[in-house]
Amino acid sequence: MFKKILIANRAEIALRVIRACREMGIRSVAIHSTADNNSMHVRLADESICVGPPSSRESYLNMPAIVSAATIVGADAIHPGVGFLSENAEFAHMVEDHHFVFIGPSPEHTSMMGDKITAKNAVKRFGIPVVPGTEAPVTSDEEAQAFCHTTGFPILIKAAGGGGGKGMQIVHDPAHLKEALLVARNEAKANFGNDQVFIEKFLVNPRHIEIQVLADNYGNAVHLGERDCSVQRRHQKVWEEAPSPVLDDKARSDLGELVIKAVKGLGYRGVGTFEFLYENGQFYFIEMNTRLQVEHPVTELVTGIDLVREQILVASGEKLRFTQKDIKFKGHAIECRINAEDPETFFPSPGKITAYHPPGGPNVRIDSHLYNGYTVPPHYDSLVSKLVVFGDTRDQAIQRVNRALKEYVISGISTNIPLHQRLCANPVMASGDYHIHWLEQWLAQTADEQN
Ligand code: MV4
């Protein structure tokens, strides 16, 4: 087992990894920028080391500085957390070249899944349903026209190097195809340094449902069920839950089994997530995330499995200690992402916390780096807390979220707590009958009503 892990991240996710390390008897090392000198992850880790100035590019994304830091502190392994370098194959390679263990999949799997075309083709071989689309980059207008002619409009042009919603173009009719291809290619080149694009049939109002997997180095793999992440705004998830309000046990185990076939077939190692769109009772794979995810706690609460602990164990070469039949799903979990942002305009709201009181009581979990007197810096992601609750039923979980939000005091900055309170009171949320565009449509509609 590792003696010392360097955590190449900050904020709540760095705390999450520090907590797992401490429970496992592993020393933790925080890296930080000069803007994060007073951050909770620096205080809670056993050691800390500054890797650069405030800008992420020069600190949390600074690969040579991070690998040098690992050398200086004598770490055995590097945990990339989420975001930042967590899906950067070059970083994983560099980490391995310097004889540290990268706590994640092989760089080859990260590269394969980083390219959305190779990712789709790879999982399709194992029988996973994918969105109908071109199987290779589209190189000519004629090719694009031919695909759209067979599939019909609307279609969506995506960047092979994209993901997370950047650089997509919806096309509703043939007259706009040529122009949209040009725009998509230029944006892809500018954003991802790769001008390859592909085309998919556009699913109009799907849900986003993802399956969590965990695999060791010896061909053992399990799935941990799904998370429904359909409540989102501008490609940022806002509210995640497990189980999905629309899946039954059979649909879950059927899809889970398929996914596990692919995980084993690919020889994938570590934690990972298969992302699907779900519409009219059908699943369509879109992407795989080759890292831990922000919303992993909802899976932990319904399975009782500590995903970060298991992730560290398999990275250190341990065998999975359970099989699929040992995994039991119980109750319902909901995560609210609390962001430092204006509840009306959604503009970031960094600043000093003047009062802080997190909720407690039965089945309430807070993953947050906030403390009274802390100043939320303006340089990074606005996520400041994850309120995660567990209930026997979905209704109970929603009531518990509502209760916990009422207790939560965060003064000095604005947060989206009022938005979550409105969600708890919304009949569509109560019914569970929402899709990926529902939140934005509802926000637009309620804004209109106020004018
Ligand atoms: C789609 C889609 C509809 N049809 N693909 C957005 C981010 C990236 N992960 C894929 N995305 C989408 N791909 C087809 N063929 C709609 C989306 C999409 C979306 C997906 C998941 C969660 C939120 C979303 C918000 C807007 C669009």
Image (cartoon, grey):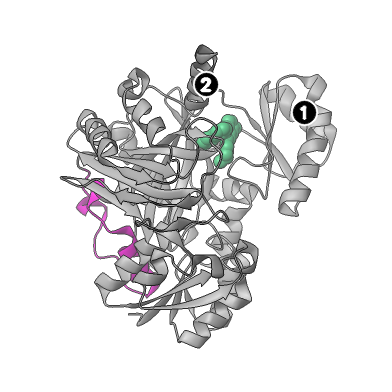
Quarter of the image where one finds residue 281: top left
Residue 146's disc number: 1
Q: Amino acid at mark 2?
A: Gln
**Within the magenta stretch, is there residue 385?**
no
User: Where the C terminus falls, by quadrant?
Assistant: top right
Residue span colored magenta? 301-329
**What SS does tag 1 mark?**
helix
**What SS does tag 2 mark?**
helix
Q: Mark 2 vs ligand 1: CB under 8 Å?
A: no
Is residue 319 visible to us here?
Answer: no
Return the x and y of residue 10 as percentages of the image width and height. 46, 63
Q: Name the residue nearer the viewer: 150 or 269.
A: 269
Residue matched to label 2? 441
Mark 1 to mark 2: distance in Å? 33 Å
Is residue 114 visible to us here?
Answer: yes
Whether 84 is drawn above or below 354: the answer is below
